Every structure is written in structure tokens, then in C-alpha cells.
Amino acid sequence: MIIRPWQESDRPFLRTLFLHSRRANWTWLDGSDWQLEDFDAVTLDETIWVAEEDGHRLGFAAVYVNDNFLHSLFVDPDAQGKGVGSALLKKVQAEFTSTGSLKCLTQNRRALAFYQHHGWHVEAEGTSPDGDYLLLHYRLP
């Protein structure tokens, strides 16, 4: 598996992956109004890393680099549990220049456990239009 920078030709696949992954994993939310183009708005002005294996795109991570903020990490539902998310997260963490941060919806228990397993710690709580979230930090070693 390789982790590489995003290129425009990834857009159609990543749009689909983003939509399907949210529908598969965020079952507590009403996703009836979600659209493929949501990917474009969510990742605007972000650095995007793509996980690829044998020519197949398996996931992506989108980061606000200047803020060391991991905004999105999504893995194809068929590739979950196979190290794709861990590889993307490792790449993102390696690019941080100071403490990293992210927000994780509290209902997304699987993702929360994943981040905590990788050394992220809860720093604060908040509320968003999608529900309550936890602010997590990752301190550089």
C-alpha cells in the first residue's frame, strides 16, 4: 500500500467513497440529503492524502496543514480493518509540525477507539450540527 498526494483524477472515486463511508458508518444521522459533491466542500483548501494498493484507492485523509488539524479520514467500507486507516493516520501524524488535533463525533465509537489506540487523547467536548463531538489531540513524540 502506498500513501500519496491527491490528484484531480481521484475526485470521482473519493466523492463516492466519502458518501458511501458516511452512510455505512454514520448510521445515527439522516444522510438522505448527502451528495457526491459534499466531498468538494468538505476538503476545500485541504491537503489530501490517498491510500492506494494495486491501483485501487482505499481511503483518504484531508488535513488543514497550517493548523495540524485532521479534518477527515475515510476508508472504503470494504477495506476497513485492513490497516488502511492506520497507514493514512501514520502519514498525517508524520506531517504534523506541532500537536495535532481532530474532532470525532461521540456517536462514532469505532473511530474514537481507533484514534485513542493510536495515541490521541480527549481534550475537550463540543456540539456541532451533526451532534456532540470530542476534540482530540496528538502530541508529537
Image: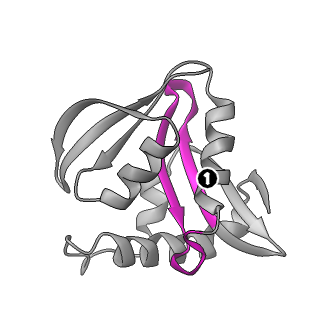
Q: Position of residue 135 (x, y in %)?
A: 31, 35
Q: Is residue 90 found inside the magenta-colored segment of the image?
A: no
Q: Does the rendering let one see residue 101? A: yes
Tell which residue pokes out farthest to the right in this image: 54
The structure residue drawn at horizontal position 43% and vertical position 54%, both measured from the top left corner, is: 42
Q: Residues within 10 Å of mark 1 (few under 14, many from 20)?
A: some
Q: Nearer the viewer, residue 37 or 49?
A: 49
Label 1: state its secondary structure: helix
Question: Position of 37 compared to 9: left or right?
Answer: left
Question: Position of 113 compared to 119: left or right?
Answer: left
The structure residue drawn at horizontal position 55% and vertical position 48%, both measured from the top left corner, is: 62
The structure residue drawn at horizontal position 51% and vertical position 77%, both measured from the top left corner, is: 77
Quadrant placement of the N terminus: bottom right
Residue 22 in which image quadrant: bottom left
Question: Position of 97 compared to 15: left or right?
Answer: right
Q: Is residue 75 found inside the magenta-colored segment of the image?
A: yes
Above or below, comparing residue 135 to residue 48 in the picture: above
Residues in magenta, as a range: 59-81
Q: Position of residue 41 (x, y in %)?
A: 43, 56
Q: Does the rendering let one see residue 36? A: no
Give the residue type at disc 1.
Ser
The structure residue drawn at horizontal position 64% and vertical position 61%, both measured from the top left corner, is: 83
Quadrant placement of the C terminus: top right
Tell which residue pokes out farthest to the front in this image: 117
Residue 34 in which image quadrant: bottom left
Q: How many marks?
A: 1
Task: Identify the residue under disc 1.
Answer: 86
Q: Position of residue 14 (x, y in %)?
A: 58, 69
